[in-house]
Image (spheres, rainbow, N blue to C red):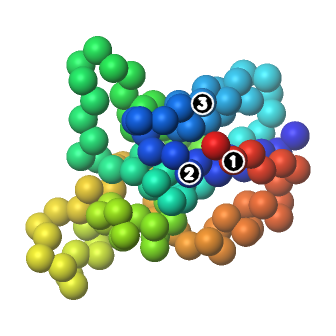
Amino acid sequence: MNYTILVTGPPYGTQNSSTAFLFCQSLLKTKHILHSVFFYCDGVLNANNMTTPAIDEFNLINAWQGLNKKHQVKLYVCNSAALRRGVIEDEKLFNMNVKKGNLALSFQLSGLIELAKSIKICDRIIQF
């Protein structure tokens, strides 16, 4: 089966993101196809490169990046939700007084149209 995962919870403070990550790992281990992960609402905070967990905590942002590198899973971040929460990429800075963006590597800003395309080609969408 072909899956799209929708993450709406922040990386820390709730179980949404960590459960989504573990579910993605399970999908890949069982030979399902994970087309993409779409981060929306507070889920866009998973793409914030400035997030620094305690040394003894699981680094979820690094884990998402590893999923992208190892399995080429697309990590889409809703542009509007990201801007509302202060997650921006370097190329968007010309209109703001910020020197460097904080969008983590491997994540890409996109619109809801990308989510719609993913839903169209997948068998299942699961929201966390």
Q: Earlier in the sequence, mark 3 or mark 1?
A: 3
| Identity, as a three-letter code, of the amino acid under mark 1 | Gln
- Give the CA distance from mark 1 to mark 2: 7 Å
In the displayed structure, does residue 92 sit left or right of residue 28? left
Give the position of the N terminus as an image quadrant.
Answer: top right
How far across and down, in percent of the image, does residue 72 sit?
A: 58, 42
Q: Residue furthest bottom?
A: 95
Question: Does the CB distance between marks 2 and 3 fall below 8 Å?
Answer: no
Q: Residue at x 51, y 65 (%)?
A: 78
Per the image, the residue denoted by label 3 is: 19
Q: Residue at x 40, y 36 (%)?
A: 12
- Give the CA distance from mark 3 to mark 1: 10 Å
Per the image, the residue denoted by label 1 is: 127
Q: Is residue 93 visible?
A: yes
- Give the CA distance from mark 2 to mark 3: 12 Å
> Which numbered circle lies on residue 61?
none
Please name whichever residue, 20 or 16, is drawn nearer the observer in this view of the structure: 16
How far across and down, in percent of the image, does residue 116 sit?
A: 73, 69
Q: Quadrant of residue 126?
A: top right
Q: Residue at x 33, y 56 (%)?
A: 103
Question: Relative to 31, does residue 105 appear above or below in the rendering?
Answer: below
Per the image, the residue denoted by label 2 is: 8
Q: Residue furthest front?
A: 13
| Identity, as a three-letter code, of the amino acid under mark 3 | Thr
* Label 3 element class: helix
Question: Relative to 101, does residue 21 appear above or below in the rendering?
Answer: above
Question: Does the CB distance between marks 1 and 2 fall below 8 Å?
Answer: yes
How far across and down, in percent of the image, does residue 42 sit?
A: 46, 54
Mark 2: give few (<14), some (14-19) or many (20+) Cα within 10 Å: many
| Identity, as a three-letter code, of the amino acid under mark 2 | Thr
Question: Does the CB distance between marks 3 and 1 fall below 8 Å?
Answer: no
